[in-house]
Amino acid sequence: MIGMNGEQPTRQAHRTLARPRPTPRSWLRAIVLLAVLLAATISSSAQGDPHALAARALTVNDTAHVHYVKESGAQLVDEGAATGTLPGTVRVSFNVGATVAATFTIYTHGGSIVGHGSGTLHSSRSRSDMYVSFGGTMTVSHGTGRYAHARGTGGFYGTIDRTSYAATIQTTGTLSY
């Protein structure tokens, strides 16, 4: 390397061109700057910054049309399509007695949602009625993918065909994820 006067710099001059070592004072400045940036980020998140990560909430209204797949002990297993707020496929395991108890999994494009519901069977006028209806509540307990932290509650309604075990199920409520 040639210096400004056209001569080779001495070893001492070459050292002054080297990168300076960080001092405790420069480390302190870096830490203070980092703390200020972190505080600003937390403050903007608390004030609703659109880039902040927050739980999402949906008002859900879905209908599933499911058909009989198999019987497993006292459980009827049905599968089918779900339409509405969270379209996809659904698998439901029913236990039908004086009440209807069900566990369900909805498979959506972004992940799955798992929950359970229960409802009271509505008495029919005649034992020969092909369909029986029910109404009650459901709870979402967890999920996968974008719904990994899913939680929710709502209504659980539907009809069951007594001969084919096909069912139409409607869920309404709120879902946080």
Image (spheres, rainbow, N blue to C red):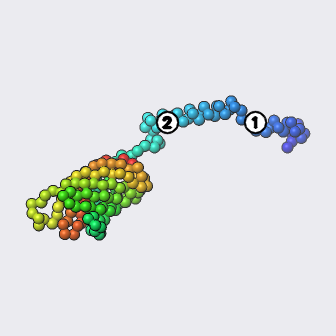
Q: What percent of the width, then of the height, locates residue 150?
A: 38, 50
Q: Give the structural element (helix, strand or loop) at label 1.
A: loop
Is 106 on the left or on the right of 126, as rendered?
right
Give the secondary structure at mark 2: helix
Q: Say which quarter of the image contains residue 92.
A: bottom left
Residue at position x 36%, y 48% from top?
151
Q: Amino acid at mark 2?
A: Ile
Residue ID for mark 1: 20
Depth check, front residue: 35 or 101: 101
In this view of the protein, which residue sits in the foreground, 87 or 67?
A: 67
Distance in Å between CA atoms under marks 2 and 1: 34 Å
Q: Residue visible at 40% across and 44% down?
A: 55
Q: Quadrant of residue 135?
A: bottom left
Q: Would residue 65 appear left or right of 5 to someone viewing this image?
A: left
Farthest residue, direction top: 25
Among numbered discs 2 and 1, the one appearing first in the sequence: 1
The answer to whether residue 80 of the structure is visible from this angle is no
Note whether 110 is above or below 58 in the view shown.
Answer: below
Residue at image location 30% in from the left, 55% down from the top: 116
Q: Amino acid at mark 1?
A: Pro
* Residue 33 at x, y percent in the picture: 60, 33
**What residue is disc 2 on?**
42
